[in-house]
Amino acid sequence: MQNAMVPPAQTGLAAGPFAHPRYTIKRPFFSFLGRKFYVYAPDGSLVMFIKHPVLKLKQEFTLYTDETESTPLLTIKARAIIALNMALDVFDSRTGEKLGTVKSRGLKSIIRDTWDILDPNDQPVGLMQEDGAALLRRFIPLLTSKHHLELGGSEVAVVKQQFRFFSKEFELDLSMSQGRIDPRFAVACALLCLMAESRREDSN
């Protein structure tokens, strides 16, 4: 099943932003009309940017190379406006290729954020899950978070929050994936789990 999420050989634009084994994702505490996420390469250069709007009914996001929003990389679209098990499809913005789907487990995510990972043919191949004291974090938001992504029972990515006073900062580690997951899809998954945290903060 793991092979369904392995990318083809990447060239050009896709090879640049998605060629790194680790990323740092930063989100300012305050931003106007939406949460902004900045994705940095290991050398500190900005390689991706996404804004999570707060006023749109249907979830749809575009990941760009930078804040000018002139060069799209990925498009993430929800299949419905409201659903208990919300499914979001991830597409390559340049080619329209569907990379996979992230599907919430609904009520189970009230206590611990959990998503099923589906391949481009909608077949389940893994999961993404919040780790640690998830329930306690619902009451004490200052506690740092951790999520992991697995395919076929093997861990392929980890998103771990680093404590900072004036911003939210997370490390996305793909070094253990060994080519088992498309890095474009892994980055999208990481951003979706952080957006879920943002929505929870906004509702508190």
Image (cartoon, rainbow, N blue to C red):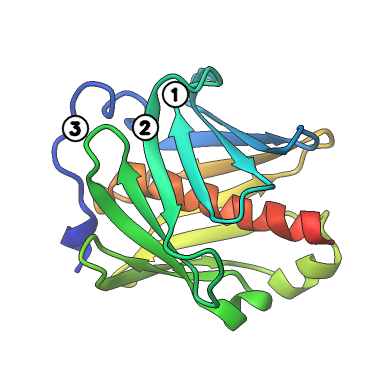
Q: Amino acid at mark 1?
A: Thr
- Label 3 SS: loop
Q: Determine whether, in the image, residue 141 is placed left or right of residue 193.
A: right
Chain-order first, disc 2 or disc 1? 1
| Residue to which mark 2 is pinned | 73
Q: In the image, is residue 168 above or below residue 185? A: above
When asked about the image quadrant of residue 187, the answer is: top left
Mark on residue 108?
A: none
Q: CA distance from mark 1 to mark 3?
A: 16 Å
Which residue corresponds to mark 1?
65
- Locate the C terminus by quadrant: bottom right
Q: Which mark is residue 10?
A: 3
Q: Position of residue 195 (x, y in %)?
A: 61, 51
Identified at 16% across, 60% down, the residue is 3
Q: Position of residue 119 (x, y in %)?
A: 26, 63
Dot 1 lies on which element? loop
Asked whether, in this view, residue 152 is left or right of residue 135, the answer is left
User: Which one is closest to the eye, mark 3 or mark 2?
Assistant: 2
